[in-house]
Amino acid sequence: MELKSEPQTFREYLKSNKVLFDQTIMRFLPQTIKTKEIQLLYDMMRDYPSRGGKGLRGSLCLLWCELFSGKKNDALVTASALEIFQNWILIHDDIEDGSDMRRGLPALHKKFGVELAINTGDALHGKMWELLLTNRTIVGTEATLGVLFEFARMLNETTEGQHMDLSWSLQNDWNIDEPDYLLMVTKKAAWYTCITPCRLGLLISQNVEKEENLSKLMDQIVDFGTHLGIAFQIVDDVLNLTADETKYGKEILGDLYEGKRTVMLIHLLRKISGDQRKRVIESLSKPRPAKSAEEMNWIYDLMKNSGSIEYARRLAAKHSTSAMEIFDEIAAKQSDLHPRIYAQTRNLLEYLTSRDY
Amino acid sequence: MELKSEPQTFREYLKSNKVLFDQTIMRFLPQTIKTKEIQLLYDMMRDYPSRGGKGLRGSLCLLWCELFSGKKNDALVTASALEIFQNWILIHDDIEDGSDMRRGLPALHKKFGVELAINTGDALHGKMWELLLTNRTIVGTEATLGVLFEFARMLNETTEGQHMDLSWSLQNDWNIDEPDYLLMVTKKAAWYTCITPCRLGLLISQNVEKEENLSKLMDQIVDFGTHLGIAFQIVDDVLNLTADETKYGKEILGDLYEGKRTVMLIHLLRKISGDQRKRVIESLSKPRPAKSAEEMNWIYDLMKNSGSIEYARRLAAKHSTSAMEIFDEIAAKQSDLHPRIYAQTRNLLEYLTSRDY
């Protein structure tokens, strides 16, 4: 792969896409509103999208469109709508998960109250569909409706996954086995982070003529994206324990304070028993302010000593390998595959499953 | 109008429509889910739609489709989606407004917690778009996309209106004049209760051939629905003060306990001054549990003595008359208008603006 870009170049590529998404979103969301009482609503809608983020989902969508010889520009509105999706759902998730911070700043409901933040999430959600309807003049009626179906499916999977995750927390349920966890992660993370972005790119390329082939590819992407999404989420969870805090930008061990179910924790709870297991569960079940750094570090040490982190890394690597195999299978069938696009997509996939912050 | 149906018949007509909406919605939302953790999500999605309600918005949509010689069946999916819209937005509104009860039962977030309720609202919102996408095989691609645009617009107006209303409450702002209030009500209530249902019916009829005529009618409906929606909301607010509690099903004077901005209150605050005005505002600004029945009844008596309720009734009647005039103007141009449909629509409009519970 001579054309494989260097990490620096790849980051620049991501950044240049992010600029395009930001422009599309910011032009679409009015900045100045005549009715002064409504101005704040639009300021709130523009808040999360202005806070940065990497634009990974949008980039995945653009690249998969190009992989199938589609035009990058055709996918821009859809990719930006994916970024809007992430932003409005994060507004609601932050309330549901009780998260105080988002991208280094107070969460929206911490700044403006839960009432206005829920409504802003809904308003931004509505704007997402409105933006998607502008696709009509870009990709035509057929692809526009296909894209809308994909978004409806993505939202269905994501809310089911969020429901599972929230239910476990609210019921203080720690008897979760790995298949339960993997189903939750597939629904909550893999669909909107991996599966749907890639399916959208393929749809928008409009370069697969036979309905039968398209449908087969769409199914393969579900398989591919499930593995990719699981690997992505496990890597993300491992980073939460092990990352360099200055680079990571989030609170280290934050997931333990939040009592989040992860592969490491499920592994640990399988490895320990009796009083020790009881003490771990008691510690994790405490309300966040009652948790001490000492306790959380103790659980982290237990995880290290029980091989839970190594286990999670291996599981992530296994899913990552499966994803890459399916990806190469799909790519091998593309006769007019552009080497640069192939290399950039592979870089992105590798970044998603092996990043260190 | 020989065919004008009797009140009883009209209520039966509404009920029969409601049965159709319920069937459409309940068939669309799966009842049994394989993954046991997700079962509760679907039970929660089906909760508000199972609680009754009159189906006014859906009926308005069906009637306006028939007014323009469209088929009632063609509008059924869209009318049911309007009912889903009302249900998911009520789930979120009940949290935002701090309402404990909905249709005689505890609000969804009171039964299952705010976290799951927000997510359920989002899930039901997603299902609304999914249902609307099934329109394709019923009304074709063009009308399907047109309907989606209408829903996006409706959601935009509704969230803007809710933002205005919430902001006033959160900022404890009582310096609201009537035009502010009417703008808020138009956005928060008139669009989703009146304007959009009628525009959707017209769109689905697909019986206005000239683009120019369609666009003119759509504008007239905005004008008509604004008057109708304002009249509807004022009548609703007056009922909250004056209705027969056994029929009404909600708490009488509940709006005063909630500190809700209404025409009566704006009128009262204009009529009184000095210490009296200060005392009224102080009473209304208290948190709900701190408000006494004595205080609320005192404010209600002030409203009666200041002519605020009479003023509101007159204002509602004025807007109702304007709505009826525009309606008759629109109807007069329909050469193939069916007398039964005309009568039923007029009955519904009159019911909306003069009901006593």
Image: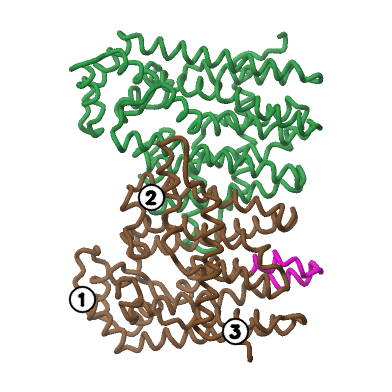
Chain colours: A green, B brown
Q: Which mark is residue A112?
A: 2
Q: Is residue B169 above or below residue A47?
A: below
Q: Is residue A136 above or below residue B96?
A: above
**Front-most of B70 and B352?**
B70
Q: Quadrant of residue B48?
A: bottom left
Subunit under mark 2: A
Image quarter where the N terminus of chain B lies is bottom right
Q: Amino acid at mark 2?
A: Phe
Q: Nearer the viewer, mark 3 or mark 2?
A: 3
Q: Amino acid at mark 3?
A: Met
Q: Amino acid at mark 1?
A: Glu
Subunit under mark 1: B
Mark 2 residue element: helix
For the point 49% across and 86% down, the residue is B317
Q: Which residue is identified by label 1?
A: B295
Distance Cα–Cα, label 3 vs label 1: 38 Å
Subunit under mark 3: B
Task: Say whether residue B212 is magenta.
Answer: yes
Mark 3 residue element: helix
Q: Residues within 10 Å of mark 1 (few under 14, many from 20)?
A: some
Q: Which residue is identified by label 3?
A: B324
Please determine if labels 3 and 2 lie on a single subunit.
no
Region of the chain picked out in magenta, as a range: B199-218
Q: Is residue B129 above or below residue B157?
A: above
